[in-house]
Image (tube, helix red, strand yellow):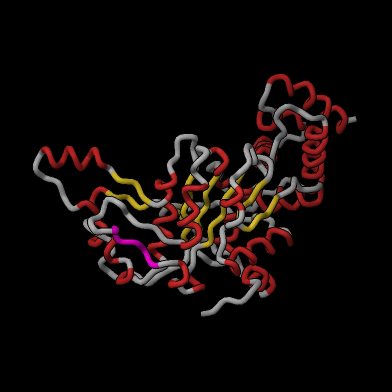
Amino acid sequence: MIMTFGELSRALKDGAKPAASLNENGRPTARGSGYQLDAEAIAGVDVAIELGRPLLVSGEPGVGKTELGYAVARMLQIPDLYLHTVKSTSDAGELFYTYDALQRLRDSQLGKAGDVGDYVEFQAMGRAILSAHQRSTVAPLLRGKHAEASGGAAAPRRSVVVIDEIDKAPKDFPNDLLHEIETMSFRVKEFPGDPPPETPAFDKVDRSLRPLVVITSNEERQLPDAFLRRCVFHEIPFPDAERLKAIVSAGLVNRLLRMGVRTDGNVPTLGAGPAAQLVDLMLKFRDAQPDKKPGIAEMLDAAALLVIAGASDLSVVKPAMVKLKRDGALFQDAVRTIAS
């Protein structure tokens, strides 16, 4: 199947329902349900798919950058998403695989070392790339336990990769990914061979199977120009009042389910009036310039609290929306403004 420009746009226009099930790193997840995509986000995803480049998503914390990848997976009926959360100690190679040299040494000392492939664990990007190929084309990388686990010759499938908060990585992390991002391929340097086996290049993968890569950044530092050139950029602004109301309406049930609240088939709602008040409080509190502005995650937490407590007093959501002691007075001022 050859995709044409506007895959996500067409799916939404044709009324495709988001997939009910989604796996994150092999486990079911409820994330991405009810996400509200605007026209710019849809266009950004479509351009990234068409060009075969990662979508770099920026914006302040809490605006839904990470959740965007989950929502797109659901809307495109892609069942598998692989999440890699970047840390200050992350190595670019860990995005593809990890190698347990210490365990292999211990096993060697005990005389029970297995194949080198038994000590390799494929990670987010590695799993997505491997799953996009016919098993026969990546067989040299499926050694040891991986050869046994994939013995059923599963059909190639498409997946989404979310690389979360890349700006937290060491300085060289983005540049170390340049070749892999360009070719959408990788090699396992611990495997025998000169050079070691490598997955086929990006142009060898059917367009309908190529992984969609979403990279998020809080813009805590500037990313290298060479890395930026290889990405499609999309910035998520903080939503306006009407969009925030739609987010509360669409995301409340999912938030309650993630908290373990049983709905017993009854869809809980906050009501138009309380929802409007909560959104008004959110915007007034943010406009007061607290040191830590609440994001969409905090707003949904607050909405869930109001439903669970059956409360109309907005002060009850203070623990969910105020993260720093010195912001408490600004929050109470915003509550009083709405109550008056």
| Position of residue 261 in the picture relative to residue 328 (left or right) | left
Q: Residue at x 77, y 39 (%)?
A: 278
The image quadrant that residue 7 belongs to is bottom right
For the C terminus, give its image quadrant: top right
Residue 193 in sight here: yes
Residue 68 percent across, percent down from the top left: 61, 54
Residue 79 in sight here: no
Q: Residue at x 64, y 66 (%)?
A: 46
The image quadrant that residue 256 belongs to is top right
Residue 82 against residue 329 in the figure, above or below: below
Tally of numbered discs: 0
Residue 231 against residue 327 in the figure, above or below: below
Residue 170 percent across, percent down from the top left: 50, 37
Q: Which residue is drawn at 76% across and 32% down?
A: 314
In the current view of this chain or complex, which residue is farthest to the right? 340
Give the extent of the magenta segment: 195-200
In the current view of this chain or complex, which residue is farthest to the bottom? 1
Residue 189 against residue 150 in the figure, above or below: above
> Camera-side residue: 53 or 147?
53
| Position of residue 29 in the picture relative to residue 200 (left or right) | right
Q: Which residue is drawn at 40% across and 46% down?
A: 94
